[in-house]
Image: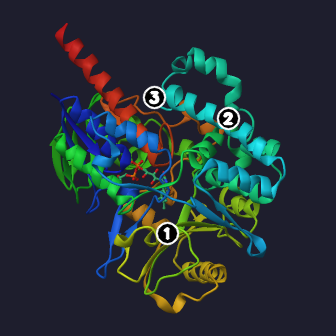
Amino acid sequence: MAKILIIGSGFSSLSAACYLSQAGHEVHIYEKNETVGGRARQMRTDDGYVFDMGPSWYWMPDVFERFFADFGHQVSDFYELELLDPAFEMVFPDRAKFQVPATYSALRDKFESLEPGSATRLDQFMADAQFKYEVGMKKIVYKPGLSLLEFLDVDILRGALRFDLLSSFSSHVRKYFSNPQLLALMEFPVLFLGAMPRDTPALYSLMNYAGLKLGTWYPMGGFGKVIEGMARLARDLGVVIHCNSTVEKIVTEGRKATHLLINGRQEAMDAVLAGADYHHVERNLLQPAERNYSEQYWKKKVMAPSCLIFFIGLRKKIANIRHHTLFFEEDLIAHSKEIYKTPKWPEKPLFYVCCPSQTDPEVAPSGHENLFLLMPIAPGLEDSGAQHEHYYEMMMDRLEKHLDESVRQDVDYKKAYCIDDFVEDYNSFRGNAYGLANTLMQTANLKPKIRNRQVDNLFYCGQLTVPGPGVPPSIISGKIAAQQLLSQLKRESHEATI
Ligand SMILES: Cc1cc2nc3c(=O)[nH]c(=O)nc-3n(C[C@H](O)[C@H](O)[C@H](O)COP(=O)(O)OP(=O)(O)OC[C@H]3O[C@@H](n4cnc5c(N)ncnc54)[C@H](O)[C@@H]3O)c2cc1C
């Protein structure tokens, strides 16, 4: 039995901890914050609001089911899922709206009403996206990304051209649709989670299949319930979770990490898995000669956006709001350029509003609403706080116009969260919210590696390594890293016996 220490308690760390403990090892998680969950923590206010601080879109339910099934469980043993219908609403110029229905047949009808002939093209688009999703899930995303040989697989080779790695997402979507609302609907997932649609490989149309075909779900009680469920499973498997425990250094001897320095005290170990932000681990916990990558390398990386968030409590219910609303009344390309090309605080941003209290009475006091406003911005912008109010007023103006009612005077809780908070709370590189952008040059084997090249028993997991940003990929990342670490332990014990 080896003693394995894990840095951080985000989705990837909790996932890895479960696999490592299941394999019979002693596993400890060290988390710097007071509570577990990393970017998916919850914040509870004294007067009864429960805010999810990060994820709110529960997509790819199959990944969560597969995770719990690996431990003889199902999702419903830990939390209850609700299918959202409408899945979400998009707001366009001139007060036009598009509600995305939960069923595919209703979605086809909506497409057809906006662009004649597009329902059949949606079928074709989705068949292609389904292929990418299914082959991707079975054959690609669970690979550690250490060698190209991993992709020598009949299905992968046969389907290589269909993965559309070399064509852009933007031109791919335009082969099927021309209506601006339909284009925005198809492009929003890659924009919010990754990069400009024209810099994203068309492979990521698999996200459209995930979002539009597999459904948009909501874990009752909020995303925090998923974290709670995974932490409960981890503890049941024997994992010990230590909060308020900042890892200050990975202590090494030759090619071995021997201890972690935690809150000034050394803890011995046989192996370490870093689930904190990759750049922070390399830059702040290791000596230069032990790092996989230089500062130059990180400077060239394209990070996914950061964001300005407002957690808002309202002392009244509102009628004209859905669980998820995307405000796309401004120009998508102009905003994405301000995120990715010429980083600056945006002129006319798109933004997103989540109102989970429309679905779930537990996340706000009775008769109140819980609102989460999120505006994507370039990571690394100067965040003095001076800009926050300007964008609060801008988003509230547009929200009130959409609602056809004023709400500002009913705000009884308000908290801004932005770049400096991501850095302070999570040691996030440049204050990124979602890790690395999904560009071609940062896909699969081209992502930061899951194992350290100089320190044999140090591995990495999380949204900055394979397979990428988002909750489902982070859960998968934990599994891949745990498998790699277990193989290394097996190799070592084999070498020790011969
Ligand atoms: C605002 C926002 C909205 C999002 N929306 C969605 C969504 O709707 N759907 C979706 O699928 N994904 C979404 N995501 C992305 C998703 O939340 C992340 O990809 C995922 O949670 C990342 O998990 P992780 O394990 O990589 O890292 P993290 O959650 O970042 O966990 C890393 C942990 O390491 C800890 N740590 C850092 N340094 C140290 C140290 N020195 N010592 C000890 N601990 C340390 C941190 O405190 C943190 O708890 C969103 C993210 C954000 C921020």
Q: Residues within 10 Å of mark 1 (few under 14, many from 20)?
A: many
Q: Eyeballing the image, is 363 above or below 297?
A: below
- The picture places residue 41, in percent across and down from the top left corner, at 35, 61
Q: Earlier in the sequence, mark 2 or mark 1?
A: 2
* Spatial CA span between label 3 and label 2: 27 Å
> What's under tag 2, amino acid-wise?
Ala
- Would residue 365 be seen by someone viewing this image from the given angle? yes
Q: Eyeballing the image, is 368 above or below 145?
A: below
- In the picture of the structure, the residue carrying the numbered disc 1 is 418
Residue occupying the point 66% across, 41% down: 205
- The picture places residue 330, in percent across and down from the top left corner, at 74, 69
Q: Earlier in the sequence, mark 1 or mark 3?
A: 3
Secondary structure state at the residue bearing disc 1? loop
Residue occupying the point 33% across, 57% down: 225
- Would residue 248 be seen by someone viewing this image from the given angle? no
Say whether residue 122 is left or right of residue 116: left
Say whether residue 302 is left or right of residue 71: right
Closer to the eye: label 3 or 2: 2
* Spatial CA span between label 2 and label 1: 39 Å
Q: Residues within 10 Å of mark 2 (few under 14, many from 20)?
A: some
Quarter holding the N terminus is: top left
Closer to the eye: label 2 or 1: 2
Picture quadrant of ligand 1: bottom left
The circle drawn on residue 110 is none
The circle drawn on residue 127 is 2
- In the picture of the structure, the residue carrying the numbered disc 3 is 144
Secondary structure state at the residue bearing disc 2? helix
- Residue at mark 3: C-beta within 8 A of ligand 1: no
- The picture places residue 376, in percent across and down from the top left corner, at 59, 63
* Spatial CA span between label 1 and label 3: 32 Å
> What's under tag 1, amino acid-wise?
Cys
Nearer-the-camera pick, 37 or 34: 37
